[in-house]
Amino acid sequence: MNLSFLILLPFVTAIAILFCNGLKQVRTVALIGTAAQFLLSIDLLFVYWKERTTGNNSPFLFDFNYTWFAPLNIHYHIGVDGISVAMILLTAFVVIAGVLVSWTQESMNKEFFFLLLFLSVGAYGYFISLDIFTLFFFLEVAVIPKFLLIGIWGSGKKEYSAMKLALMLMAGSGLVFVGLAGLYYGTNFNGERTFDLLQISQMHINILFQKIFFPFAFIGFGIFTALFPFHTWVPDGHSSAPTAASMFLAGISMKLGGYGCLRVATYLMPEGAHYYAWVIILLSTIAIIYGAFATMMQKDLKYINAYSSFSHCGFVLLGIGMLTQTSINGAVLQMVSHGLMTALFFAAIGMIYSRTHTRMVEQLGGLLKVIPFISTVFVIAGLCSLGLPGFSGFVAEMTVFMGAWQNPDQWYRLATILACASIVVTAVYILRAAGKTVMGPITDHHYNNLSDATWNEKLAAGILIIGIVAIGIAPFWLNQLITPGTEHIMEHVGKAITLK
Amino acid sequence: MSEITVTHILFVSTALFFTGMYGLFTRRNMITMLMSVELILNSVNINFVAFNKYLYPGKLDGVFFTIFVITIAAAEAAVAIAIIINLYRSHHSIDVEDASELKY
Amino acid sequence: MNNYLYIAFIPLLPLASFLVLGLFGRKYFKTFSGTVGTASLLASTILSLYTAYHYFFIDGKVNGVFQQIIAFKYTWLQFSPNISIDMGIILDPISVMMLVVVTFVSLMVHVFSLGYMKGEERFATYYAFLSLFTFSMLGLVLSSNIFQIYMFWELVGVSSFLLIGYYFEKPSAVAAAKKAFIVTRFADLGFLIGILILAFYSGTLDFGVLINKLTSIQSPEYLNITAASFLGASMLTWGLTLVFIGGAGKSAMFPLHIWLPDAMEGPTPVSALIHAATMVVAGVYLVARLFPVFSIDVTALQIVTYVGAFSALLAAIIACTQTDIKRVLAYSTMSQIGYMMFALGVSKYGGENGLGYMASMFHLFTHAFFKSLLFLGAGAVIHLVHSNEMKDMGGLRKLMPITHITFLIACLAIAGIPPFAGFFSKEEILLAAFNSNKLIYGIAVFTSGLTAFYMFRLYYNIFWSKEADIHEIHHGEGTFSMKLPLLILGALALTSGFVPIASLVTSDGAVLETHIDFGFSALPVLLAVAGILLATYLYKRENSKPQTIANSLGSLYKAAYKKFYIDEVYLFITKKIIFNLIGRPAAWIDKNIVDGFMNLLANTTAKISELIKGLQSGKVQNYALYFFGGIIGLAALFIYLWK
């Protein structure tokens, strides 16, 4: 399978959109394009599976390598392992749902859909890159559209939020770049410097080098995935963004960071990861607990979900910081699960907002009676968020807990217990939001005239719910999919740690 | 009466250069500033000719450069005056202080 | 070995019914949804009765001892080579007994709801939720893996949330649902950490292996877990206590009982199913499931005993003062579950010493029938008078004869009057307590007297007291579908005491010889009769005596009426401490300090730029001056500093 299609397809769709006229044409083209992506990624899953079952054990499949800047030894090197396939699937799910919920985007629709698709080009490219420079390139491609999406189509204090988000993410990219450049100058592969992930992983990078450059790379990627205390772009950015952009932001962009932390920072600098593990665990535990408590006091639905994303992404970092096979599995599961779940949550909030024109919990009430479908979606997203068995959130969180507990350090155990405690706080804020918004008496008589979800909204929610339930009911397939990838990383980490 | 040495000539050209420089910094009228620039260029021309004469009497490189500079100065004057005319059309003034939009 | 795979259909049928009704019920089964749900459950009930017959009488026993059979096992999620969540089906005496209890009571509730919930707008949703609950409860009962039980535990919690909040337009119902979920969730946190501890030290999540490893004194796992200690208690004690906290949350043991009375906001049949017969005994079931491990840790078992006994007493005292009939029943449930808990606590593993375990399971069995009967009876009453308050009732015995008779039977059963079901199981519990701990025995006997008193206070207030106001009653006793379950359960409340549980469900699977010692039974029965007589004296006719007594007890009565202010304490902790001292500061810090720092960074940058932007004046001459200055500077540099 040629992975370049994953980049080309959204790119071609984005270009095609520029030649369309009117909302109808634009959205049809966008839907066709994203549906094709969706099918392509499902196809990728099966082709990947087939390769694995036929006994192909190389760490990355569908390898393709092309030199695009020889003087610095930069390659366009792509390939996937189970983790990337999972991430690509997540992207495809969120993108198609995002296009469906923006079905009635009136103002500047051409530019809107163009940017959405352009963002997905960045995401796909990022997940398939095996050259850290190319990876960085695609990371940047994914950042800029967000700024425009929020700044132009946002709501509330959108200019402030867009600027904040862009600046903080750019600062993150800057740190990432320092980390990557450090890696590059630390490498010596047959007398040549290299950006190639596989080549770097095979050589042993000087420990001092790792200690210096690991924090740059980790914090840089960490900013994308809401590492405490660099998470403040999350609430403002998410709440100002239009629905589809919020979905992309929380569902895909935050995962770019987690993936980078794992794939680049931890994989390439295992000693660094081991050396700084306590910092990661400390920060992520703070994020989990403190994020949960901060969520409890929010009044705006989007802020609630944004802060809860902050808290949930703490689990990703906690899983990575614990450095056990199971916890890293958990981190990846949590990325996929959180991506789907939070996209569904934002979609539901967007549907509610477009009907009631408010997102304030205090002003809403009794929606289950008037818009049962949307309310049910909202409740499902909430239940998934609070880790109900049968939905993906439970699987991911429990895997993180079990994995974290396997780390024998007593203090890390304490951190795990504290992280577990967040499930109670999560229940409090989710039930508070759901209890007031969907249940209870109807607060405004205008709500009686609301109409329930249209077909596109139902389809969008349905796609995401299928993803969530598929993981929640049968997690073994996803677990099997990602395990070779995480094992490969852990093998590396284990070797490095015992070597010390 | 002593001989005219290169020092004398350099003295003249330096005086000319700083006169031009002073004019460039203090005058607000763009035409005057342009004239000051011409003074600076001329001081350079004097240097070229003088060095050519005293250091490499057998060569003509300095003279050639002087001719180049004169040509370019003419072209430059044409362009500058065109700019000044345009500025006058838009700002109704040729005072350089009035054309300060190009800032932070 | 028989093929037991058909057992999987027992939980899967309700699941199928949930999916069908949940997805299509509103559109296609508007009025049939009750039938669909009931039919699927009927099939489940028949299957589980068949299973019980097969297990208990045909192939469960090997050499006179009941075996544990793993009927089915599938790895659901592999954490690490040893630790995985397996979806399995376990068959042993307690799970088979629970299977029968759950499906049977659930079936009764399904049938009763056909009449009770008729005409509700969300009829299909109601049945979908009931099916979901039944599915999760059956899954819980059949779990062979401690993590599997935790999953179904959570599902049970959420379906209870959905059912309590069924009347979601009532803010009080929403609040009660939230409270139930959050309190049990808090308890589940303990359960989860307990699982982590036990799983870590035993290296497995499978019940069989886990119990095996932690009960053999020589195994390295056992030595490790008892050697490791934290705050003076061994990790085994910690693990078991934390698991018990989970059980205490679901079983409404003090101090985690506060959600149960409020949970009565749900439809009454739901209370009968969830909050009387099935979900609330899950905690007891959990302790019983891990009983071999509990039995070797004295501290944990003592915690179970004292928490159970104290809850039994506290709930009985509160029940004497409540006026909402469902709340009285809720507290009586809590009290009876306390009995089951301390019966487990005073028991030991195996042989004669395992009497408490058997008694606890026996009481669980009989209690399920008479308590669901009480709730369904109360449901019938509420259906008639449209109120939960005692003051709106009275003299209903002539209007609803069947309800009256069955309710009376249930009251006699719970009071422990022979030959009703409760008598037998309660006697065993008292005997077990008497043999091991006299203090507990004292509490238990006193509580059983109180139980008789408050149950008959309830009975007289509903059916006697004053004359009924005929004009406000618009219809009769209810449909046939409401009467039938009452009759069946009434018959069971009469007879289930004769079921030979002692030879079927024991701690080690072997038959336990029991006999009724009438000399021993005399005291509790006399106390119960005294309680009934006192209630008759006070409540048979409406009079002012109860009020006088309440007045003379003064603050004690008021404290009991206000449930000993435990709710207020919780409210104080959550509202004042957690919200104001943790939540608010966290949100404030995030907004002002963490984000403030980022804004400060941005603002400082902006200020610095403000300071230096004057250099870009836009004046050509300034630029020329800088340029010239630069050249002078560079020239100076090159001339004087460059060597």
Image (cartoon, coloured by chain):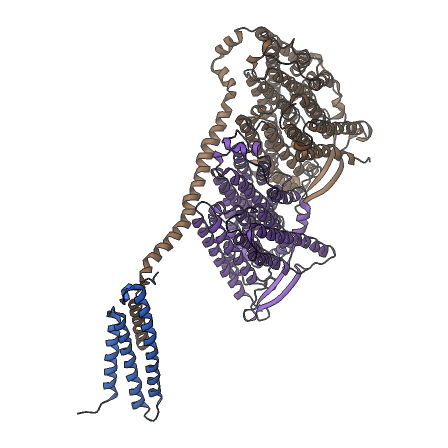
Chain colours: A purple, B blue, C brown
Q: Locate the N terminus of chain C by quadrant.
A: top right
Q: Quick check: A367 above or below A492?
A: above
Residue farthest along the left direction in this orientation: B1
Q: Locate the C terminus of chain C by quadrant.
A: bottom left
**x and y, in percent, of residue C540 in the image:** 59, 7
- Toward the viewer: B71 or A177? B71
Q: How many marks?
A: 0
- Toward the viewer: C195 or A236? A236
Left or right: C20, with A199 as reference point: right
Decide if residue C85 is in sight here: yes
Decide if residue C290 is in sight here: no
- Toward the viewer: A303 or A244? A244
**x and y, in percent, of residue A161 in the image:** 45, 49
Q: Quick check: B87 above or below C459?
A: below
Residue at horizontal 50 percent and vertical 34 percent from the top: A364
Left or right: C298, with C572 as reference point: right
Q: Based on the displayed image, in which of its 4 quarters is residue B11 positioned?
A: bottom left
Residue farthest along the bottom direction in this orientation: B58
Q: Based on the displayed image, in which of its 4 quarters is residue C7 positioned?
A: top right
Left or right: C413, with A304 as reference point: right
- Toward the viewer: C80 or A257? A257
**x and y, in percent, of residue C10 in the image:** 74, 32
Q: Quick check: B79 above or below A197?
A: below
Q: Quick check: C16 above or below A132?
A: above
**x and y, in percent, of residue C629 in the image:** 29, 71
